[in-house]
Image (cartoon, helix red, strand yellow):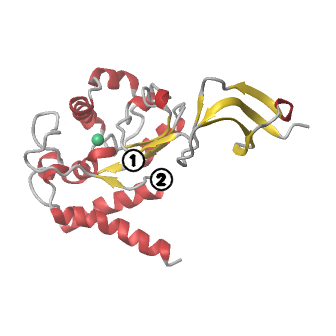
Amino acid sequence: MTRYDLLLKGGTVIDGQRTPRYTGDVAIAEGRIAQIGNVSESDARRVFDARDLIVAPGVIDLHTHFDSQIFWDPWCTMSGWHGVTSVVIGNCGFGFAPVRPEDRERAMLTLERNEAVRATTMAAGMPWDWVSFPEYLDSIERAPKGVNVLSYMGLAPVMSWVMGLEDAKGRPATAGERREMGALLAEAMDVGACGFSAQIMGEDSVQRDYDGTPMITDIMAPDDLLAFAGVLRERAAASSSC
Ligand SMILES: [Zn+2]
């Protein structure tokens, strides 16, 4: 009986622990590394010839904007080609949820300006079968993927959703709006968001909205930011006390 499901034979192992690279075999059983060293081919059900290849842990990229590309490119190229196996999307405060149908084009134009993905490509490649943040994650869940995906909740969509675009760029939120936005963040965290993101670079921000104005989060009120942070603080306190 074979002990391993898969054997990566004869690769150059770079283990990510600052150990100098070495030639070796990596054996995998039940989805986990079970042995590293010199492993006999007869011990594995499947053998992959890894000579002349690097065998290394996957790279986690915490800052990406694959929010749209993930829907038509399971490997998130070029990242996937370069060894990235986990990506975090929803960075810099903008993104695609929650977004009402009438606001989809603007959301795509924002990403087009800042991340050089054509809005026409996005419109053709995204299913847009969501409105809320939980529905967005469900849609990503359904999409075929060659990488692991985790998402922040960008604050610009949330603020625009609750306050309206003009007001979100024009004034601080009211107490009621803060509560509503906080509830949306809490809901996103409940379904798997890894936090919130916001780009805060002021009126002179170099990463501007599609129409040349600052992003919503560039000019958001500090108290609004603190209100969002308070949502996470409460959750941390609740989780550490139980
Ligand atoms: Zn970014």
Vertical placement of residue 185 versus 199, above or below: below
Q: In which quarter of the image is the N terminus?
A: top right
Q: Which numbered disc covers residue 192?
A: 2
Residue 29 lies in what quarter of the image? Answer: top right
Q: Which of marks 2 and 1 is in front?
A: 2
Q: Nearer the viewer, residue 137 or 58?
A: 58
Q: Which of 86 and 9 is in front in this view?
A: 9
Vertical placement of residue 218 versus 238, above or below: above
Could you classify mark 2 by the number of other residues whose Cα lies within 10 Å: few (under 14), some (14-19), or many (20 or more)?
Answer: some
Q: Nearer the viewer, residue 202 or 36?
A: 36
Q: What residue is shown with label 1?
A: 133
Ligand 1 positioned in quadrant: top left
The residue under the point 24% across, 66% down is 226
- In the rendering, at what x and y percent does residue 175 appear? 20, 68
Q: What element carries label 2?
A: loop
- In the rendering, at what x and y percent does residue 67 appear? 37, 36
Could you classify mark 1 by the number of other residues whose Cα lies within 10 Å: few (under 14), some (14-19), or many (20 or more)?
Answer: many
The residue under the point 42% across, 26% down is 78
Q: Taking 10 as reference, is 21 left or right?
A: left
The residue under the point 44% across, 26% down is 77
Residue 23 lies in what quarter of the image? Answer: top right
